[in-house]
Amino acid sequence: MHNDRDTVSEPRREFLGYLVASAALITHTAVTWARESSTGEAAKTTHSLTTLNDSLEGDLLLPENDRYESMRGISWNRLIPERRPDVIVMAKSQGDVVATLKFARQHQRRVAVRGGGHSWCASALRHGGVLLDLSQMRSLTIDSATGTATIEPAVRGVELIAAAAEHSLMFPVAHCPTVPLSGFLLNGGNGLNYNRLGNAASNVISIDLVLADGRQLTVSSESHPDLFWAARGAGPGFFAVATRYRLKLHRLPSSVTMSNYVFPGAATEVATELVESLSTSMSPDVCLFLTIGAPPPELATSSDTVAVVSAIAYADSVADAEAALKPLNTDPRVGSAVSALVNQPTDLTSFLGALGSTLPGGHRALIDNIWSNAPLGTMLAKSPKHYASAPSRKSHLLVICLHLPSNSNTTSYSWLGRYLVYNNTVWADAAEDESNRSWHAAATSLLDTHKIGRYVGETDLTKEADVAQQCYTPETWTRLRALRASYDPECLFHDYLQST
Ligand SMILES: Cc1cc2nc3c(=O)[nH]c(=O)nc-3n(C[C@H](O)[C@H](O)[C@H](O)COP(=O)(O)OP(=O)(O)OC[C@H]3O[C@@H](n4cnc5c(N)ncnc54)[C@H](O)[C@@H]3O)c2cc1C
């Protein structure tokens, strides 16, 4: 005689075991939440969690689940904060997003949204509430007839570049291949060829949103322009869930050409003068960068630090690219460089890979930035000495030079200065956390005296109480606050991360 157990196959038995375990975890969580609430509604919460779990295409994870810890820790940065949500929903569709927000509203749980998990300070990881993770939403379609792309949030820059290149098109993705489009576009996005193409968010045509009250909208400059404006710059303080973006693509440049000059630490002043004099006079097809840090191992120099001046030209022909780079290549100051790469042809994917290697994944990192109009020589006077004492050779200072576009107010992104300056502190070993933390604090305070603002996408949001506000013009900040109060009056979504 067979009993029921004998007739159940092994995978089915595992699945039934999973269901029983899930039910037990859900009941446990419901009882814990009910203990917290005055009404003691454990049965109702169990029912809602079960309903949510059953309705999802993706998974619902509670702290007791095996996968909870690894999914909590989806992060570019290995310095993972100890903030723990009550529930993680690994959404697979807009329907999952709608169901999760409904559940959170019913149980008065705050929601934090995670796109691809690249925010270095893990701003989506919060104490308690629901973490709505979109990292499995990665569909990508190119329409070459209209020159547009439609993407789900977690598509990465390098994936969009590769797909668009098949149609001789491109998009101004972030300067690191693995950065997901989701948070990058909401931040405003400083991407490839920024002087010519503007910030990445100004190349967004429309966005599908789910609002706090559950409404599903497609916003654009014609439809709900106030939400469309806010979604393109509010970054980690945005008050809705973006589930799909439609993007305007651009013609792929026929020539992507780079020149690179490495100056010894003693000649940093020459490098800063060179960058200062060229930063606004070069063609808008050129992006100019200055990096200060340890010399690359392959470079034979006794210098403790080097200053690297890099220029990349996006052009329609090699001749045009070389003409655009000529003011740098023919400047007599490049004679002080110990190593030079002149008019080197590259392509977008290789260029992204090279930049990505300066901020490698799988490391521990502290990052901060300032917008500044201060003369570079004054701003960076103490940097070579400070970087020579960095505990990690991977840490570096990066200056991005912008042809300052006017704040046209078409997006909520604030271009606040001529230079965007980063202090990137990167190390591998947890045993070196303390030395790197204190070195990073000293490096950022050297920069902060020259600050006129910050870029919200890469700021240490836990630094000061008003740090998010420092990322916007007063008008933009006031408007963002008013829209937040109007579209999320019950504060369903977490506000900007602050010191916790
Ligand atoms: C190595 C490195 C290189 C970078 N390079 C650049 C660069 O060149 N230019 C640049 O501008 N930035 C750059 N960034 C910053 C980048 O823009 C942010 O890290 C951005 O948040 C990444 O997007 P994400 O979806 O992974 O964000 P996540 O970490 O997933 O989320 C961060 C926050 O964004 C919000 N959010 C994300 N997705 C959604 C959504 N779909 N709906 C609602 N809210 C959402 C949430 O509030 C969340 O807390 C870089 C970062 C790193 C670590």
Image: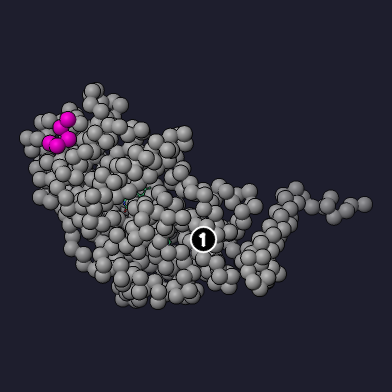
| Residue at left offset 52%, top offset 49% | 82
Assign ligand 1 to one image quadrant.
bottom left
193 relative position to 278: left or right? right
| Residue at left offset 42%, top offset 38% | 434
138 relative position to 472: left or right? right
Q: Position of residue 420 (x, y in %)?
A: 24, 51
Tally the numbered discs: 1
Q: Give the vertical position of 45 relative to 442 (above or below).
A: below
305 relative position to 108: left or right? left
Local packing at callout 1 (Cα closer than 10 Å; few below 14, some 14-19, many 20+) is: many
Q: Position of residue 400 (x, y in %)?
A: 23, 48
Q: Amino acid at mark 1?
A: Leu
Disc 1 designates what residue? 132
Q: Between residue 53 and residue 484, name the one nearer to us.
A: 484
Residue 497 seen in this snapshot: yes
Segment tinted magenta in the rendering: 266-270
Is-magenta flag for residue 212? Answer: no
Q: Between residue 331 and residue 313, name the one nearer to us.
A: 331
Tell me which secondary structure the magenta stretch mostly adopts: helix
Q: Position of residue 405 (x, y in %)?
A: 18, 60
